[in-house]
């Protein structure tokens, strides 16, 4: 059996509520807004993977994550992927720690991926899908700094109520020293 899955930064419930405050339904009446508990930052989309592959990738990921201390992200802009019709909260100045771990996790996953790897990693939290707006993007917003302390393996579960993202494995980053 396979599951649609991804590796992601996992936010606490309080952090998810803070992120949700950046949703702006007045920008698009047709948009499908993510619930607070679906807000995350995808590091690597893995696609459909067998359970054994997921466990192998998670085990290899832990070797990298053990060396990564918690780090802060400053979300400071609303932007869109217009082709994909996605509105997101972005990080205009991503820290080197985030970019480095994303690249290493991407390299680990490459042998197992069934889809093309995006050329450029854009750290973001998807706020809405089916988003279309005539507004000019990016839009500056009140900065939100969040301490990132967890990385998780998520499953994407589809139901009649929509998609939900459920963490099946979680690793807490340990401060150095």
Image: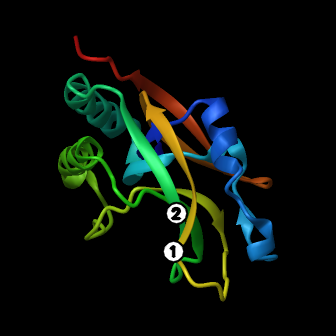
Residue 75 circle label: none
| Closer to the camera in the image, 8 or 91 | 91
Residue 59 on image: x %, y % = 27, 27
Q: Is residue 83 above or below residue 139?
A: below
Residue 131 on image: x %, y % = 66, 75
Q: Is residue 156 left or right of residue 177?
A: right
Q: Return the residue found at the far bottom.
A: 134
Q: Is residue 136 above or below residue 35?
A: below
Is residue 126 in view from this perspective? yes
Residue 51 on image: x %, y % = 40, 36
Q: Is residue 39 left or right of residue 71?
A: right
Q: Reading the chain from its start, which is encountered first: label 1 or label 2?
A: 2
| Closer to the camera in the image, 159 or 84 | 84
Q: How is the image coloured?
A: rainbow
Disc 2 residue crowd, few under 14, some 14–19, many 20+, Cα 10 Å: many
Disc 2 designates what residue? 77
Disc 1 designates what residue? 138
Is residue 164 in view from this perspective? no
Q: Is residue 137 left or right of residue 169?
A: right
Residue sitting at x 42%, y 43%? 73
Residue sitting at x 69%, y 49%? 20
Q: Are marks 1 and 2 in contact (CB under 8 Å)?
A: yes
């Amino acid at each position: 059996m396979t599951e649609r899955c991804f590796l992601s930064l996992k936010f606490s419930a309080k952090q998810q509520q803070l992120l949700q405050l950046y949703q702006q339904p007045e920008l698009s009446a047709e948009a499908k807004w993510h619930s607070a508990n679906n807000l995350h930052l995808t590091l690597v989309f893995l696609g459909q993977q067998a359970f054994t592959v997921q466990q192998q990738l998670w085990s290899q990921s832990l070797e990298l994550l053990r060396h990564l201390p918690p780090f802060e992200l400053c979300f400071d802009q609303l932007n869109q992927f217009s082709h994909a019709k996605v509105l997101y909260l972005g990080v205009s100045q991503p820290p080197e720690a985030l970019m480095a771990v994303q690249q290493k996790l991407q390299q680990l996953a490459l042998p197992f991926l069934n889809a093309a790897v995006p050329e450029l990693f854009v750290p973001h939290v998807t706020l809405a899908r089916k988003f279309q707006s005539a507004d000019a993007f990016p839009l500056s917003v009140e900065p939100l700094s969040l301490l990132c302390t967890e990385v998780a393996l998520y499953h994407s579960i589809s139901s009649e109520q929509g998609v939900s993202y459920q963490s099946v494995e979680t690793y807490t980053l340990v401060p150095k020293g």
